Image: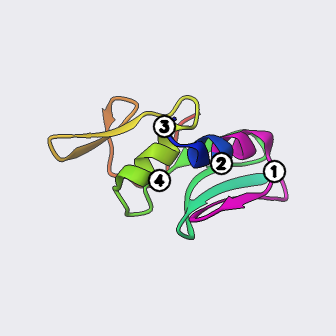
């Protein structure tokens, strides 16, 4: 995690508590935790603990940074191809764990 905002967002996401700063929010509602960037949900954990992630169509450095702050998530681009945990990825909602 390279930026404080990412660290704070991930801390709130893992603690299942509401948080907001600048362009990033964490919302906890009825057992579902959502991490959003610019109003777009990019990570969700349901009440059973299933983590899903997406780029929400925004393959930007900031989106990747926020997602990479979540333990067990590694998002990067290599030769124009997006990867999630070392597997080619289309950026759509995917279960991570």
Q: Residue at x 57, y 45 (%)?
A: 6
Q: Is residue 31 left or right of residue 75?
A: right
Cα distance, mark 4 to mark 1?
A: 20 Å
Q: How many marks?
A: 4
Cα distance, mark 3 to mark 1?
A: 22 Å
Figure quadrant of residue 77: top left
- Asked if the magenta segment contains residue 17, the reply would be yes
Q: Earlier in the sequence, mark 1 or mark 2?
A: 2
SS of the residue under disc 1? loop
Can you say whether 29 is above or below 3 in the image? below
Q: In the rendered structure, which segment of residues is drawn in magenta?
A: 10-31
- Residue depth check, mark 1 versus mark 2: number of the one nearer the observer: 2
Q: Earlier in the sequence, mark 3 or mark 1?
A: 3
Residue farthest along the right direction in this orientation: 30
Between residue 34 and residue 96, name the one nearer to us. Answer: 34
Q: Which mark is residue 9?
A: 2
Q: Which residue is mark 3?
A: 2
- x, y percentage for residue 23? 56, 65
Cα distance, mark 3 to mark 2?
A: 12 Å
Q: Is residue 34 left or right of residue 87?
A: right
Count neighbours of disc 2 (C-alpha within 10 A) and say few if under 14, some if 14 to 19, many if 20 or more. many
């Amino acid at each position: 995690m390279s930026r404080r905002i990412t660290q704070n967002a991930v801390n709130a996401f893992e603690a299942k508590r509401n948080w907001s700063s600048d362009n990033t929010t964490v919302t906890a509602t009825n057992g579902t935790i959502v991490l959003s960037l610019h109003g777009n949900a990019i990570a969700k954990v349901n009440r059973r603990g299933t983590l899903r992630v997406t780029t929400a169509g925004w393959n930007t450095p900031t989106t990747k940074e926020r997602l990479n702050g979540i333990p067990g998530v590694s998002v990067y681009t290599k030769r124009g191809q997006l990867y999630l945990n070392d597997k080619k990825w289309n950026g759509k909602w995917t279960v991570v764990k």
